[in-house]
Image (cartoon, rainbow, N blue to C red):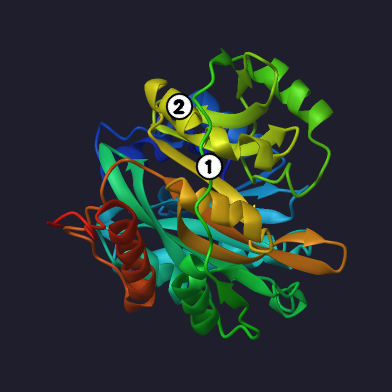
Amino acid sequence: MAPEFEPARLDDIDDLLRLYRRAHGANYPIAMGTDPDVMAAEIEAAGTTWLVWRNDNRVVASITGHVEHEDRLGKIAGLVVDPDAQGGGIAHHAVGQITDRMLATGDVDSVYGTARTIHIAPQRVCLRNGFHALGLVPNLFKHAKRETMALLARHRDGVLDQRAEVHKAPKSLEKLVTATHRTIGLPHLPEFIEGTDLPQAEPSRLEIIEAPQFVQRHFEHNINDPARRFYPLHKPNVLLADEQGAYQIYGHLNRHDGYCTIFGATPNPQTIIPHLNGVIDTLTGMGAPHVETLVPLREFDELNALLAFGFLPVALYPAMRRDGDRYHDYVVMVHTPQPPDFRGLTIDEAFRPFTEQYIELWTQKFLNTNGVFRA
């Protein structure tokens, strides 16, 4: 008989703490498995679905789902199964049941998750539950070290049929876009066009404001375009402002995990492009060498500019954002100074094309030796 998961209760917290400790040891860094106050708040949060499976009145499996209602997007995370109960399909049922619940409401168009690549099982649990491989994100912080994480998503029925068609995309995105289309079975590939190099501006001095409530109010007031306000499950907590007032950048900085997401700029994203080297240097100095941003696939010029400044595409999320009766595809662009280290990478075959395209682009960008050995 399949295990039936049910909502977690506040009196499950002690059991959950023991479960996470048994599964991950004493050094698990995620508050959702170690901090009773955070766990209690999440169990009662309107946007969180926390499911557990009890056996003999003891919690032996747990999974959480988070919904961003405004963006109609969900995320699964925190899957844990007691080591003594693993191997019986419990993880499969956990992912399937929570995803079914989230999509069945009609308030969510897709659910995504990240899976570790030190073991193949988490990837296959998602793939067998109808998730599709979308890419690999290198050098993310996970547990005690940086890891490459697999990105997967499952869409509500009919959503992928309502994607807005994109007619052209930078040539450097060809293998990523083609791999995603083949993996999911999407029609209408765009035309892939070579981009051009762009001029760089002299680094400008930046003022840094880390005041989450102020930054969020400022962001809400100044960024009005829904496409530019879109960064699911992240809120702005840092503002980088050019001293001369030429531009401002909003992001979510996480020093603990060493990354920053950029998801808003004034007067517009193109304004900051020539200054990206200075922005990245500033963020690296703040403890965030991993910088990422989401860009609509239809934004050819912006994608081309990011490519010119060393951002590389790592994933494509089809039909990620709803706009009227159409859904738009988004590219995850990442800038990281660390070379790809895929030693020990354990991935399902579905992720092979994404790995190969990233290695090829990184090599072309940072190890191109054309012209080095000339007389």
Is residue 343 at least partly visible in the picture?
yes
Q: Amino acid at mark 2?
A: Leu
Q: Is residue 373 above or below residue 37?
A: below
Q: Is residue 38 left or right of residue 121?
A: right
Mark 2 residue element:
helix
Q: Is residue 374 above or below residue 29?
A: below
Mark 2 Cα within 10 Å, few/some/many (few <14, many 20+)? many
Q: Which residue does the image show at 64% across and 19% down from the upper left?
A: 212
Q: Is residue 279 above or below residue 25?
A: above
Circle 1 is placed at which residue position?
Answer: 199
Figure quadrant of residue 88: bottom left
Is residue 93 at least partly visible in the picture?
no
Mark 1 residue element:
loop
Q: Nearer the viewer, mark 2 or mark 1?
A: 1
Q: Which residue does the image show at 78% across and 64% down from the upper left?
A: 106
Q: Earlier in the sequence, mark 2 or mark 1?
A: 1
Cα distance between the residues tagged 2 and 1: 21 Å
Asked whether 198 or 190 is in front, the reply is 198
Q: Which mark is residue 257?
A: none
Q: Amino acid at mark 1?
A: Pro
Q: Which residue does the image show at 87% across and 63% down from the upper left?
A: 324
In the rendered image, residue 191, in percent from the top left (x then y), is placed at 61, 78
Q: Is residue 140 left or right of residue 126?
A: left
Position of the C terminus, as image quadrant, is bottom left
Q: Give the total of numbered labels.
A: 2
Circle 2 is placed at which residue position?
Answer: 283
Asked whether 197 or 37 is in front, the reply is 197
Q: Which residue does the image show at 37% across and 54% down from the upper left?
A: 149
Mark 1 Cα within 10 Å, few/some/many (few <14, many 20+)? few
In the rendered image, residue 318, in percent from the top left (x then y), is placed at 62, 68
In the rendered image, residue 196, in percent from the top left (x then y), is placed at 52, 58
Q: Is residue 44 left or right of residue 332?
A: right
